[in-house]
């Protein structure tokens, strides 16, 4: 009889891997921060109510600059023959996050740069290569998102007055010469520091086929190694970038490696 019971008992599904999920995307609305000069995000309600047909209907339309809020820069943004957002390879959109922590130096100097030494320190700390990762610069800037002047480093809407951290051009050059990353993501308006008017880092990384992600949220809620990024830019044809939804996932067991504060943060994200 035992084998019969086995046959009729439905198979239990495999235990799912418990995961923390962190939304690294800011909401798009009329308050969403944008690079100076870009058109802000606007949502217009066209219909919101009962129709003559007797059913409820709600329809909106939106307009926005491309480089607004949490978004991806495609290589075409700074490279004449670079790929547009719709041409980027899918396999680069789901990849390990390599989180280089430059918070301490950014606290002291808003124009701080992540250097080659910072990148090598991540590799020696984690025992991993930066190859085939998405490099994230953790600067603490996300805490300023709700304070526009602090986030921009100026009360003015003037690209020449910005102050925020970024990647050093020498480190960008070292990356394209020595490593194969898929892209870079930052908490700030740009992965060139605010005073980097020449956009050298954009030219180097996008010029070598990598993508960039700007205005990422919740960078302090993921581990420096062990999270997988799921980066989903809107598939706009022939565009230099797109609004992008980003979700980081990592096993709950990783939380045991962190402090009590981090554990609570991550668990509240998981439940949200
Ligand atoms: Zn951009």
Image (spheres, rainbow, N blue to C red):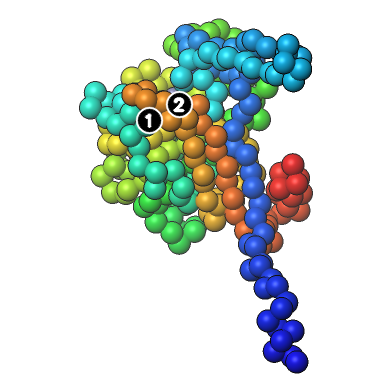
The local crowd at label 2, few if under 14, some if 14 to 19, many if 20 or more residues have their Cα within 10 Å, is many
Q: Residue at x 49, y 59 (%)?
A: 126
Q: Quadrant of ligand 1?
A: top left
Is residue 244 something one can see in this rendering?
yes
Q: Is residue 137 left or right of residue 107?
A: left
Relative depth, front residue between 83 and 10: 10
Where residue 41 is drawn, which disc sits there? none
In the rendered image, residue 144, in percent from the top left (x then y), is placed at 64, 25
Image quadrant holding the N terminus, namely bottom right
Q: Residue at x 38, y 51 (%)?
A: 132
Q: Residue at x 40, y 40 (%)?
A: 183
Q: Secondary structure at mark 2?
A: strand
In the rendered image, residue 256, in percent from the top left (x then y), is placed at 69, 61
Instruction: Please report contact status of discs 1 and 2: CB closer than 8 Å, yes or no.
Output: yes
- Would you identify the image quadrant in which residue 199 lies? top left
Relative depth, front residue between 172 and 33: 33
Q: Residue at x 32, y 49 (%)?
A: 179
* Disc 2 target residue: 242
Q: Secondary structure at mark 1?
A: helix
Disc 1 C-beta below 8 A from ligand 1: no
Disc 2 C-beta below 8 A from ligand 1: no
Where residue 85 is drawn, which disc sits there? 1
In the rendered image, residue 37, in percent from the top left (x then y), is placed at 47, 9
Classify 77 as above or below 178.
above
């Amino acid at each position: 009889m035992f084998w019969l019971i086995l046959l009729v008992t439905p198979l239990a599904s495999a235990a799912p891997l418990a995961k923390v999920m962190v939304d690294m995307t800011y909401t798009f609305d009329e308050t969403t921060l944008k690079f100076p000069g870009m058109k802000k995000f606007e949502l217009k309600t066209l219909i919101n109510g009962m129709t003559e047909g007797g059913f409820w209907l709600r329809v909106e339309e939106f307009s926005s600059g491309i480089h607004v809020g949490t978004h991806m820069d495609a290589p075409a943004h700074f490279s004449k023959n670079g790929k547009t957002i719709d041409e980027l390879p899918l396999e680069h959109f789901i990849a390990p996050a390599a989180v280089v922590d430059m918070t301490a130096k950014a606290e002291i100097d808003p124009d701080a740069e992540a250097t080659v030494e910072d990148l090598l320190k991540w590799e020696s700390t984690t025992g991993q290569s930066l190859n085939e990762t998405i490099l994230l610069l953790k600067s603490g800037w996300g805490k300023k998102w709700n304070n526009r002047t602090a986030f921009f480093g100026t009360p003015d809407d003037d690209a020449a007055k910005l102050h925020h951290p970024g990647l050093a051009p020498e480190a960008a050059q070292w990356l394209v010469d020595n490593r194969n990353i898929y892209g870079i993501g930052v908490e700030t308006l740009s992965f060139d520091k605010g005073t980097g008017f020449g956009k050298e880092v954009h030219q180097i990384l996008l010029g070598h086929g990598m993508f960039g992600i700007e205005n990422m949220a919740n960078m302090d809620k993921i581990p420096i190694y062990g999270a997988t990024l799921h980066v989903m830019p809107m598939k706009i044809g022939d565009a230099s970038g797109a609004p992008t939804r980003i979700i980081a996932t990592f096993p709950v067991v990783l939380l045991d490696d962190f402090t009590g504060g981090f554990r609570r943060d991550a668990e509240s994200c998981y439940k949200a």
